[in-house]
Each structure stands twice: as structure tokens, then as C-alpha cells.
């Protein structure tokens, strides 16, 4: 049976990936019949109404799902399709209370026009009371308009099956969150990322760059147990009596929070083992300050410093030395970590930046044990960031060959030398100056 998913016209490259992740999570066979990112309407084929409800129940980038009663490029085509698809079931809704809605994308209809469209479906023979609030059935006429056209280019009629979970965004908005930093991930994208990583009850999720806990909170909302770590102890400890636990307590999710600890990914205290169902993170891009990991710049060991008869590195106020770290090296280390800790089928959802410039385009990092599931792009002005989602392969499915390559390691000692994105960011992504040979070419 065909259904219509009404998306929000936002984060277009994420919408299909979210649906596919949720379909796989719930074991639903879903075939996309008609979809393009320039329209908020997606026709999808599902087995039954139960599958439709389950598919959008926790979706963030859709508004709801409708049983498709008809579609066409004109209203004449739509009416013929409605009769063909649904004439045999009109009697089931003959006495039900109902209402009609009209939703026009990229256009606006007057009330009189809307009423005329609604009246054009009177042949369905509904005799129940019209109820604008809490009707038994809600029917919606959807229109796709394109600029410069005097009529819609695509029209649909659907019967509402279920709304999505998009209404939770107000509760999780950062404007109301108690413990924040300048790098806290937007709550909408955090929840979408949790959906792509398939956070769910009975699963254990981990964020190695936890910050103020946006991703663990999103995973916990969907029922997963979550934990995190961060090289910046200030983020984990909090300030002025506020910390990550404060946020979990704010949303009533404390029972889903395992803990957070201070560590960097290359020196994790976790015992190696395939224990994680998901890893979800937005690693630092090294723009405001260069990326660093624990260790000395020269790589040598330092003499132990004693303070009041106790080794300095064992005292609570000790701040360990750090050394510069390359962004590409960090991406490879994240994938290595995921391969070592994810269970079979476990997912890694990783954000990474890229400039809208071929010269600074970062390769998608790959690993023999990880399969790329989806690549979603959030564009800004002169740069964008991608959400990469991977699936951990079963060991029997791993093929160690040259197709699983790691990104090129940057060489150098300074932050700019180790992070080409950072360097171009502060250059304003300007075009590099032409070489003398290019400037003197008069041929």
C-alpha cells in the first residue's frame, strides 16, 4: 500500500537517510516510490498501517504520514486516481467525523479557494459531522507549486495515519537547556543523528567528545543508555553547580545516563571489546584553537614533579601536557576506535567539516570493518559539514583490500600545518594566488 510522508523542507539530504535508518531499526520493508529533495512530499510503499505508524513515530524531519488516496499532475488526474484507489472503502468512513485541510507548498490559497478544493471531493459521500478539533479522520490535500506556474505541478490526497515526533523539539531546544557551551549541538540535529545511529532501548551509546552532552541526551530520549568522555575536564566537571547530569535531570533521563569521564580518544581507559551499539560524535574541528591530544610535543617522557611529597600527575588539579593533533589523523583514530568497540551492526555517526572548495575537500575516511551507510550534508556559506554514518560489519564480511584506505596524514607541528581546513577557514576560503607562470601566460 502507498503512503505519503510529509517532510519538513529542511535538512533535505538528511530526510531519506532518517527514514531508511528507522525502517531498518524496526524491521520494516519500505520502498520509496517517488521522492526528490526539492519537495516535502514522499510516496513510500509499506505493508500496512501499523508499519506506517511505526516508521514515523520517532521521526524528526517529517510532520506525519498519510494513507495515499490519490495523486496526479492535475486535479482531474487526482480525482480519477482517488476513485481508482479508494472507491471500494469510502463506506468505511461514511459516518465518521472528519475534516479536510489544504497544504500548499510554495503557494498560498485563499479560504474560498480552499473550500472549493474541499468541495470537489464531495463525491466520496461522507455524511459524518465535520469536526475541526479531534475528528476521527483527517484528510489533507497537498499541492506542490513551482515558481512561475499558475497551477500546482503535483497534487495529492491523503488520510492522516499518524503524526511524527517533531513536536518534541520545543522541549529540547537549547534556549531552555540549563547547561550549555558555545559548541553544544543543535537539539534538532542531535536527535536526527541519534535516529541515523539507531539509538533505542537496550543499546549502549558513547560520545568521545561529549561536551555538554547533547548527543547522549538525544540517544537517551530514544531509550538508549549513554555515556561520554572529553579531553576537556572543564566540560565534564561543569561550572557553577551545573554539569551534564543537570541536563539529564532536566529531561527526566538520569536513569539513562551511565557517566562521563576525562580522556582523549587516543588514550581511552575503556577496555577494548565489542561492547558499544553506537558511537555518535561531533569532533572538534580545531578552528578556534588547534586540535590536541595527551602527550608531550617531543614525544619523550618527563621527569616526575613532586609537590608536597606527592607526584604532581596524581593530584586533582593536575593538567596533563598536550601536543598538536592532525584532523585527518583524528578521523582515522575515530574509525579505528569504532572498529574495535562496536558490536556487529553497530553504527558510528560522525560529523566532519569540509570547504566548498575542491582544493580543501577532505576525503571520506574509510575502514575495512566499517561500511558507509549514508552521507548527509549541511551547507553553510563557504563551507559545509557532513554527517557520515557507518555500520560495523561482521568479521566474516570484512574484506581487507585497497578500497579501505585511510586519509592522508598531514605533516607538521603547528595547528595550521596539521589541519588544512583550519588554515583555509582563517584565510576566508580565498582562492590561492596565481603562480608567476600563470600570471605571465599571454598565449
Image (tube, rainbow, N blue to C red):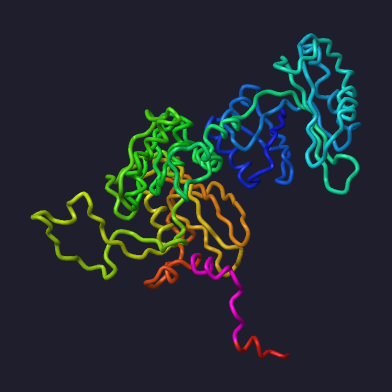
Identify whether 312 is placed above or below 253. Answer: below
| Above/below status of 284 relative to 78 | below
For the residue pair 112 and 71, the one nearer the viewer reads as: 112
Would residue 339 be found to the left or right of residue 153 on screen? left
Image spot of residue 185 (x, y percent): 50, 46
Residue at the image position 54 percent from the left and 30 percent from the top = 26
Name the residue located 26 percent from the left edge and 68 percent from the top edge: 299
Q: Position of residue 66 (x, y in %)?
A: 71, 27
Which residue: 63% across, 45% down?
11
Q: Which residues are magenta?
A: 422-435
| Residue 313 placement, left or right of 99 | left
Q: Is residue 393 visible?
A: no
In the rendered image, which quarter is residue 217 located in? top left
> Would you identify the image quadrant in which residue 135 lies?
top right
Residue sitting at the far front: 240
Residue most toward the left?
A: 309
The quadrant the N terminus occupies is: top right
158, 303: nearer the viewer: 303
Amino acid at each position: 500500500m502507498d503512503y505519503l510522508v510529509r517532510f519538513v523542507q529542511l535538512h533535505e539530504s538528511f530526510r531519506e537517510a532518517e527514514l531508511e535508518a528507522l525502517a531498518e531499526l524496526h524491521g520494516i520493508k519500505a520502498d520509496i516510490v517517488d521522492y526528490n529533495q526539492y519537495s516535502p512530499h514522499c510516496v513510500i510503499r509499506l505493508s500496512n498501517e501499523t508499519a506506517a505508524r511505526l516508521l514515523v513515530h520517532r521521526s524528526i524531519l517529517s510532520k506525519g504520514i498519510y494513507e495515499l488516496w490519490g495523486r496526479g499532475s492535475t486535479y482531474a488526474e487526482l480525482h480519477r486516481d482517488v476513485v481508482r484507489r479508494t472507491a471500494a472503502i469510502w463506506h468505511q468512513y461514511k459516518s465518521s467525523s472528519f475534516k479536510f485541510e489544504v497544504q500548499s507548498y510554495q503557494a498560498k490559497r485563499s479560504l474560498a479557494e480552499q473550500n472549493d478544493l474541499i468541495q470537489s471531493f464531495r463525491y466520496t459521500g461522507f455524511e459524518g459531522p465535520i469536526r475541526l478539533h479531534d475528528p476521527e479522520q483527517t484528510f489533507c490535500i497537498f499541492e506542490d507549486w513551482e515558481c512561475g506556474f499558475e497551477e500546482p505541478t503535483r497534487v495529492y490526497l491523503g488520510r492522516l495515519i499518524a503524526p511524527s515526533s517533531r513536536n518534541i523539539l520545543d522541549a529540547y531546544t537549547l534556549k531552555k537547556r540549563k547547561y550549555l557551551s558555545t559548541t553544544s549541538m543543535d537539539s534538532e540535529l542531535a536527535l536526527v543523528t541519534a535516529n541515523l545511529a539507531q539509538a533505542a532501548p537496550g543499546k549502549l551509546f558513547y560520545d568521545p567528545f561529549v561536551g555538554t552532552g547533547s548527543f547522549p541526551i538525544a540517544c537517551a530520549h530514544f531509550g538508549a543508555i549513554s555515556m561520554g568522555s572529553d579531553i576537556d575536564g572543564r566540560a565534564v566537571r561543569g561550572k557553577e553547580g551545573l554539569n551534564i547530569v543537570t541536563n539529564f535531570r532536566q529531561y527526566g533521563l538520569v536513569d539513562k545516563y551511565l557517566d562521563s569521564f576525562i580522556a582523549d580518544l587516543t588514550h581511552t581507559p575503556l577496555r577494548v571489546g565489542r561492547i558499544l551499539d553506537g558511537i555518535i560524535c561531533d569532533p572538534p574541528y580545531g578552528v578556534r584553537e588547534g586540535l590536541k591530544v595527551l602527550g608531550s610535543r617531543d614525544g619523550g617522557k618527563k621527569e616526575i614533579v613532586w609537590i608536597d611529597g606527592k607526584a604532581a600527575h596524581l593530584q586533582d588539579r593536575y593538567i596533563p601536557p598536550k601536543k598538536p593533533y592532525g584532523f585527518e589523523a583524528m578521523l582515522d583514530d575515530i574509525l579505528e576506535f569504532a572498529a574495535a568497540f562496536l558490536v556487529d551492526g553497530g553504527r558510528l555517526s560522525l560529523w566532519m567539516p569540509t570547504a566548498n572548495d575542491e582544493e580543501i575537500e577532505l576525503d571520506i575516511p574509510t575502514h575495512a570493518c566499517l561500511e558507509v551507510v549514508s552521507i548527509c550534508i549541511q551547507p553553510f556559506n563557504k563551507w559545509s559539514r557532513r554527517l557520515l554514518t557507518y555500520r560495523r560489519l561482521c568479521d566474516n564480511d570484512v574484506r581487507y583490500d585497497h578500497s579501505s584506505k585511510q586519509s592522508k596524514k598531514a605533516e607538521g607541528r603547528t595547528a595550521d600545518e596539521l589541519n588544512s581546513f583550519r588554515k583555509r577557514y582563517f584565510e576566508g576560503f580565498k582562492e590561492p594566488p596565481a603562480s608567476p607562470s600563470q600570471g605571465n601566460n599571454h598565449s
